[in-house]
Image (cartoon, rainbow, N blue to C red):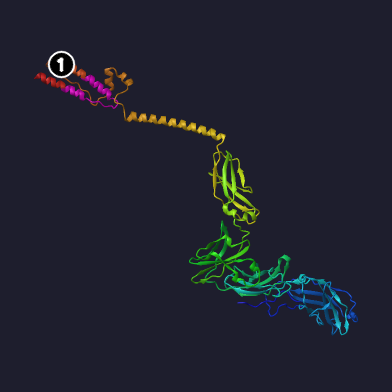
Amino acid sequence: MLHGLVSGHCREPGGGRRRRGRPASRHHTTPPRHHPPDRAVPRACADGDTRGEANLKSENVEIHIIDDNFFLKWNSSSESVRNVTFSADYQILGTDNWKKLPGCQHITSSKCNFSSVELKDVFEKIELRIRAEEGNNTSTWYEVEPFVPFLKAQIGPPDVHLEAEDKAIILSISPPGTEDSIMWALDRSSFRYSVVIWKNSSSLEERTETVYPEDKIYKLSPEITYCLKVKAELRLQSRVGCYSPVYCINTTERHKVPSPENVQINVDNQAYVLKWDYPYESTTFQAQWLRAFLKKIPGKHSNKWKQIPNCENVTTTHCVFPRDIFSMGIYYVRVRASNGNGTSFWSEEKEFNTEVKPIIFPPVISMKSITDDSLHVSVGASEESENMSVNQLYPLVYEVIFWENTSNAERKVLEKRTDFTFPNLKPLTVYCVKARALIENDRWNKGSSYSDTVCEKTKPGNTSKTWLIAGICTALFSILVVIYVVRVFLRCVKYVFFPSSKPPSSVDQYFSDQPLRNLLLSTSEEQTERCFIIENASIITEIEETNEVDEVHEEYNSQASQDSGNYSNEDENSGSKISEEFLQQDSV
């Protein structure tokens, strides 16, 4: 809802308002800025009746120009004289052709409006003169110092139209002057507008923004009354206009479908990536773009927004579109959301400068080992960047990151050269490198993504060769030691678990005596003395001989089995059995 408006600050001489029909408001407004008035330079002229000159004088002549409205004001010492009128003439400087100034003939007050004067060029100097009249008596002419209307003119307040959204206000601003204004004919698209906005409930929380003729003020709250005032500026000329009346409007209630927020656009190699935030799923999005220069032109331009390819009815919170959509220049992009309940308002418009964000492709890196302590790096352009003009439009530098493969410590250097060397490195060590291209002297620090990582090993040095030889020798010696230890271990295992059936000869020689051998050899059972009853002596000798042979055989068997700690008495028993058999035969 649009509330009452306040009169502006640019006032005509005598306190009159330039624009009428706007009721006053209690809001505080800024005092107007006025150019210092021109002073009249009294000079006597040959023409005109000089009778009564002492009583008919005009003094302190001032000229005020606001847009295409021209005002002339003066003070007179003849105000107490009845039936005194004033008239003014003008001429283009250097023409010597005085003409009656329209709107300023036979004026009874001390001011006049000569906006109807026909001027072909507001950059030409004009001279004005004025005199007092009473009947046939006139004063001498007082000439105003020549002035240039354009330089004298003050920028008036613009007209403003408002529309409300839940979190934004749409501004439609008409430039100062009229559509056929001759004063600002060349500057209508050069105006910049400064808006001061505040909540109606608190005029202390003001914020100032610079806007275009057709623009939005964002970051507002729903269902709040906001008031604002606007002034126009010509920044190149350092000229600031008057504030408009104060306008107040209510924002709408919160929309059912919220608008996307935090719109951003980035460069990703060969494409642009448009991103935004949105709290809900099951939503489709649409994105549009507009050339920035169109926003400077007064009037509606909603039908000049164009659809961004690949960004229509997308279900994700980002979209990717090719780089060839935009040529060099400044653009605006915006996004809105749609679901089954409706469509949101457009998001905040995001400015996008292709010159600030040129597409720079990552370089191609190659690295080669030169010596045992240095690596040579070469930086080349990719095939894609060779087809682009960015390398010609912008001088590039390279940010190179270099590190040892086994360490996290990185060295970062900037290089203008495409061939350079990293010295003082360790021999036989793997080093890695990656780089990206940057625009030289770019305050935004825009650049490409990093190249692929390339790793290379340095060559061996003299010290490395010595250590290599020592290492090889140590390895061979270690192998021999291991072989020897393994062999000894295997022999021990074989000796313990797989003993030989015959003792070594060196051991056998110490057991040559029969008593000693018998002491050393252990038996499985205690030896007992055997007693026999001999009836036939002739058989005894034969049995003894047989026993002697058996004892020798038994001794040999005992020696053969002493490593295992066991021996057998089977032969002894068998001998005894044989003896018993002989005895039995003999007895028979």
Dot 1 corresponds to which residue?
540
Residue at 16% in and 23% down: 577
How many numbered marks have been drawn onto this rendered protein structure? 1
Residue 189, image x, y percentages? 68, 69
The correct choice, above or below, for 97 with respect to 452 in the image is below
Magenta residues (range): 550-577
Mark 1 Cα-neighbour bin, 10 Å: few <14, some 14–19, many ≥20: some
Residue 336, image x, y percentages? 54, 68
Quarter occupied by the C terminus: top left
Q: Main secondary structure of the magenta part?
A: helix
Looking at the rendering, which quadrant does residue 143 occupy? bottom right
Residue 23, image x, y percentages? 68, 79
Looking at the rendering, which quadrant does residue 330 occupy? bottom right
In this rendering, does residue 434 appear at all? no
Q: Amino acid at mark 1?
A: Ile
The correct choice, above or below, for 373 with respect to 161 in the image is above
Q: Name the secondary structure under disc 1.
A: helix
Find out whether residue 567 is within the magenta segment. Answer: yes
Left or right of residue 145, residue 498 in this image:
left
In this rendering, does residue 83 appear at all? yes
Residue 196, image x, y percentages? 66, 70
Q: Nearer the viewer, residue 411 or 562?
A: 411
Residue at 49% in and 33% down: 472
Residue at 27% in and 18% down: 515
